[in-house]
Image (cartoon, rainbow, N blue to C red):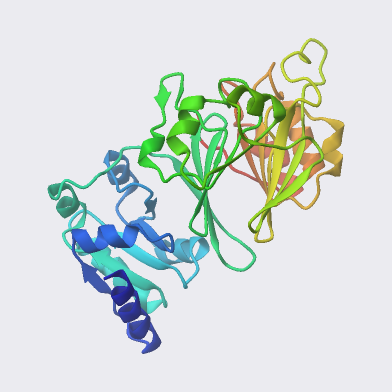
Amino acid sequence: MFAYLLATLGLNVACAQASYEDVDVKGFAELMTNPNVVVLDVRTADEFKDGHLVGALNIDQAQGDFIQKVKEALPTDRAIAVYCRSGRRSANAAGRLAAEGYKAVNLKGGILAWKEAKMPVTTDTYEVDVFKTKSGKTLKFYALVHASIRIEYDGREIEIDPVTKLGNKTIDYTAMPKADYIFVTHEHGDHFDKEALKQLTGEKTQLITNKRCAEMLGYGEIMVNGQSSTFNDITVEAVPAYNISEGRTQFHPKGRDNGYILTIDGLRIYIAGDTEDIPEMQDIKDIDIAFLPCNQPYTMTTEQLVKAAKTVKPKVLFPYHYGQTDVKGIPAQLKDYGIDVRIRHYE
């Protein structure tokens, strides 16, 4: 069914017809299993928060910049499975998307039909940032909690420091796909969680971590500071992450923990781990996206984070791991440096 639908959609687009396909719940669920299909919720943000399909991206079709936002987030070679409450708004959105060259599929009956069929929905409202790689593929970051980041890329799942519970927030990894790669920076409980690893691990999962965590688990591929490895087409560099301030060095001693730089289809992503503004940051170059921690006394103060950002010079900066630290003033301090600072709610 999936192959037929995509073939039909491809033919419609090739014939320059602004058409799309309507499918029922069963067909829509089948489409969702394909990693090349993007699920798009075109309702309002408030409706999305009340319950949505797992893994859906939310862009409100009623907004004037709807098509612009879709184009910024998704290349036209991706099939888009669209839904709304009853199917009317999504039918309109699917037609507009088809007119722009997208292969669009609409869920008949919308999320109402989906729920009536007792299909799963979630109220998790993780913020999602979508980027395009240099060859036009889609890469999505989900802000889960604290230092836990989920990355979707080309049908693959990458998890950074997954934890199932932190404070009052619980992450249900059983509702997510098994990970292709899991990266763990160090042994602290807000980064290293055996239960999360268990929930995410499948037959093909590769765990990459530092020596200490591998010893605690009895398995895992060890990377040390300064080492580079390639996993399929993803290049990984393990970089230092440690404390330098007097009275803090016991939290993260030099040489024990990892930060990681992932190069994915030309996109360079720096995940700093628990660190201060260490001298080695001067050697980190050409970063597109950086995740820098900010919760004193364990990682950086806001002043240190700003200094680190000026050193690394990422195009996009996500302060993370910030706990109760007020990070709202960081964008203003970096506005003249060409760095796009995005504050996401990890806590």
- Quarter of the image with the N terminus is bottom left
Q: Residue furthest bottom?
A: 15
Q: Position of residue 119 (x, y in %)?
A: 21, 47
- Residue 101 is drawn in which quadrant? bottom left
Q: Position of residue 41 (x, y in %)?
A: 33, 55
- Residue 342 is drawn in which quadrant? top right
Q: Residue at x 25, y 56 (%)?
A: 84
Q: Residue at x 16, y 51 (%)?
A: 112
Q: Is residue 248 above or below residue 19?
A: above
Q: Position of residue 109 (x, y in %)?
A: 16, 59
Q: Is residue 12 above or below residue 64?
A: below
How many labels sit on residues?
Answer: 0
Q: Position of residue 36 (x, y in %)?
A: 43, 64
Q: Is residue 314 visible?
A: yes
Q: Residue at x 69, y 60 (%)?
A: 266
Q: Is residue 92 above or below residue 313?
A: below
For residue 18, side relative to residue 220 (left or right): left
* Residue nearest the viewer, comparing 284 with 319: 284
* Residue nearest the viewer, comparing 299 with 336: 299
Q: Residue at x 29, y 76 (%)?
A: 4
* Residue nearest the viewer, comparing 332 with 90: 90
Q: Residue furthest top?
A: 247
For residue 222, side relative to residue 77 (left or right): right
